[in-house]
Image: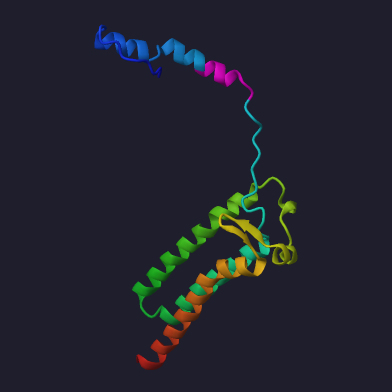
């Protein structure tokens, strides 16, 4: 669309025709854009500062959470169904990043766990040490697992 000043002396159709490109002009502009060489496709690293071991720890913490659900809360078929739906959501939640990491151009550039713990990573709010970043990534699933485990044990002890 061409942004022009509206000429009050012309009619609406003339103003629209002056501002809106003709089909031929639009197709020619699109062909000119397509003629330019597009940049080569290369997948960028999904999380270049985070080692694969941290991802495995996060997956293990959610598996532990699901294990607590199955072990302590799956007493009825309805509860078992609900926990199964949650398990499917958790599987999809981790399948998408796994796909992103599978198409990564150079996974060897990812830092080791020791280097991550020593150097940390940059975040939107500043630099975090490796220990602080690991705690931030694991605090929710680990504390949920511990809290639900305590509630499940209390439910088994006090509810017949």
Q: Position of residue 136 (x, y in %)?
A: 56, 67
Residue that sits furthest to the top in the current view? 9
On the rendered image, what quadrant is the N terminus found in? top left
Residue at 45% x, 61% y: name it: 89
Q: Is 157 left or right of 31, judged from the image as shown? A: left
Q: Nearer the viewer, residue 42 or 9?
A: 9
Residue displayed at 25% across by 6% down: 9
Camera-side residue: 153 or 32? 32
Q: Nearer the viewer, residue 115 or 99?
A: 115
Residue 70, image x, y percentages: 46, 76
In this picture, which residue range is highlighted in magenta? 30-37
In the picture, measured across the screen, residue 57 lies left or right of residue 80, that is right
State the image coordinates of residue 81 (x, y, percent, origin top left): 38, 69
Residue 120 x %, y %: 67, 62
Q: Quadrant of residue 126?
A: bottom right
Q: Is residue 3 above or below residue 76?
A: above
Q: Which quadrant of the view contains residue 8?
A: top left
């Amino acid at each position: 669309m061409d942004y022009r000043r509206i000429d009050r002396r012309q009619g609406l159709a003339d103003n629209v025709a002056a501002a809106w490109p003709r089909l031929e002009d639009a197709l020619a502009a699109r062909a000119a854009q397509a003629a330019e060489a597009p940049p080569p496709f290369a997948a960028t690293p999904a999380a270049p500062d985070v080692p694969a071991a941290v991802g495995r720890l996060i997956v293990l913490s959610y598996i532990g959470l699901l294990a607590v659900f199955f072990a302590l809360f799956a007493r009825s078929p309805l509860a078992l169904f609900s926990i199964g739906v949650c398990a499917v959501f958790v599987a999809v939640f981790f399948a998408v990043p796994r796909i992103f990491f599978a198409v990564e151009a150079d996974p060897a550039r990812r830092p080791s766990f020791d280097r991550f713990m020593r150097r940390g990573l940059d975040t939107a709010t500043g630099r975090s040490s490796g220990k602080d970043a690991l705690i931030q990534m694991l605090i929710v699933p680990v504390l949920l697992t511990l809290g639900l485990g305590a509630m499940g044990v209390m439910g088994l002890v006090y509810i017949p």
